Image (spheres, rainbow, N blue to C red):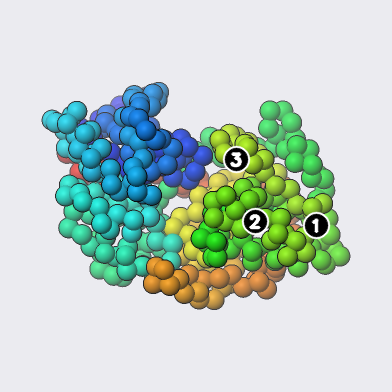
Amino acid sequence: MPKIEKFKGAISIASNSYGVPTGYGQQVQQIADRFLKHGVKVANISNYGLEGSISAIRTKNGIIQHYPKGFKPYSDDVIPLWHEHFKQQHPDLPHVLLTLYDTWVYKDMQHEGDIWAWTPIDHTTIPPKVLEVLRQDNIKPIAMAPHGHREMNRMGIENIYIPHGIDTNVYKPTPDWHSQNMRELMDVPEDAFLVTIMAANKANGVLHRKSLAESLLAFSIFRQEEKYKNSFLYLHMEPSNAYGGFRLPALLKACGLDEESVRIADSAQLRTGYPQEAVAALYSASDVVMAAALGEGFGLGTIEAQACGTRVIGSGWTASPDLLGPSSFQIEGQPLWNETQQAWWQVPLLSSLVQALRLAHAEERGTDEPSVDFAKQYDADHIFETRWIPFLQERFK
């Protein structure tokens, strides 16, 4: 067994709490576990997942100091405080603050120490508020997708590229869940064409970054054709507008979709999180996953689905095209101005979404091996060894 390289350093990760059922929470767990394995001391400063008290997260590789969220929405009021508190416990080590969240939220944060900003760029251009943060002297930008890396380079911002990763021991072709056929559990016929949308139903009440309305309407138009009648839609999301998203019952009705053709995830289970093995089985049971957003900073679901052998319908802009393997479908869009961020998104063309569904329907059913092979490059261990370790060697000499 090869010797594990150890580093002398301490990292405070400002993001969602370790292991909570969000994309950020899963990434925190992945990198924190691996930092600890390589000797790095780790703290987790939460902006979602812990409130009111300092706790400790016990992992197989060590203990993580867990700090609660602040009074401001993104906890930028307490991040410097908790980081300093953690530093005092390890005064002999070099310390760094690692932010894993939308970078613009930290534009007014008062912190003079080194910050590694693991940055999503989910617009076709970099928003001015993001640029303002990335150009600060104490910031070391880390692009999480090739699109962000290219855009930072174009704007003259020195950065490195480290993508998000997935556990390919979990996200793999998974036909059953607890020895039960997943389609039976979902009440979807085995011979049906199953389309899945796995996305948080979060929005500002007007624009939905995941292009939810466009995707539902495209499925409705697709299903109206006689040859596609035996098609079902699974929505892995909160059905209410509790998170500022859309009211699914009203939207489904507006799109002409009846309850018989749609399956929706259990709302109570969503609150605490589906086990990752169950999510892998849901992906594997699907014939195609729709993930055509207005913009993506990365898009973990795109890689997770392909790792499970399922093709993806994804956007042809921002982070998505680089994450679509040879068997997936890249759709077309047109520019959409985001006034709040002063930057461009793109909205999927309805005709392109419908055509992608037709093409997916024509493909052979079952596990798509080229998709599985493509996703292997995003294995979390592979990314840590090839990307994070060289970076740590440079920073924690």
Element under disc 1: loop
Q: Work out whether residue 277 or residue 254 is closer to the camera in this orientation and state it.
A: 254
Kindly report the distance in space between the C-alpha atoms of the residues bearing marks 1 and 2: 15 Å
Q: What is the quadrant of the C terminus in the image?
A: top left
Element under disc 2: loop
The residue singled out by tag 1 in the image is 258
Pointers 3 and 1 in contact (C-beta within 8 Å): no
Direction left: furthest residue: 92
The three-letter code of the residue at mark 3 reads: Leu
Residue drawn at the location 13% of the way across and 30% of the way down: 92
Residue 353 in the image, given as x and y percentages of width and height: 66, 67
Kindly report the distance in space between the C-alpha atoms of the residues bearing marks 3 and 1: 23 Å
* Disc 2: CA contacts within 10 A as few (<14), some (14-19) or many (>=20): some
Q: What is the quadrant of the N terminus in the image?
A: top left
Residue drawn at the location 72% of the way across and 38% of the way down: 182
Residue 336 in the image, given as x and y percentages of width and height: 50, 74
Q: Is residue 297 left or right of residue 293?
A: left
Please indicate, yes or no, whether residue 276 appears anywhere in the rendered image. no
Label of residue 247 in the image: 2
Above or below 59: residue 263: below
The residue singled out by tag 3 in the image is 270
Residue 247 in the image, given as x and y percentages of width and height: 65, 56
Q: Work out whether residue 386 or residue 157 is closer to the camera in this orientation and state it.
A: 157
Above or below 123: residue 99: above
Element under disc 3: helix
The three-letter code of the residue at mark 2 reads: Arg
Above or below 81: residue 220: below
**Residue 126, image quadrant:** bottom left
Mark 3 vs mark 1: which is more N-terminal? 1
Residue 257 in the image, given as x and y percentages of width and height: 77, 60
* Disc 3: CA contacts within 10 A as few (<14), some (14-19) or many (>=20): some
Pointers 2 and 3 in contact (C-beta within 8 Å): no
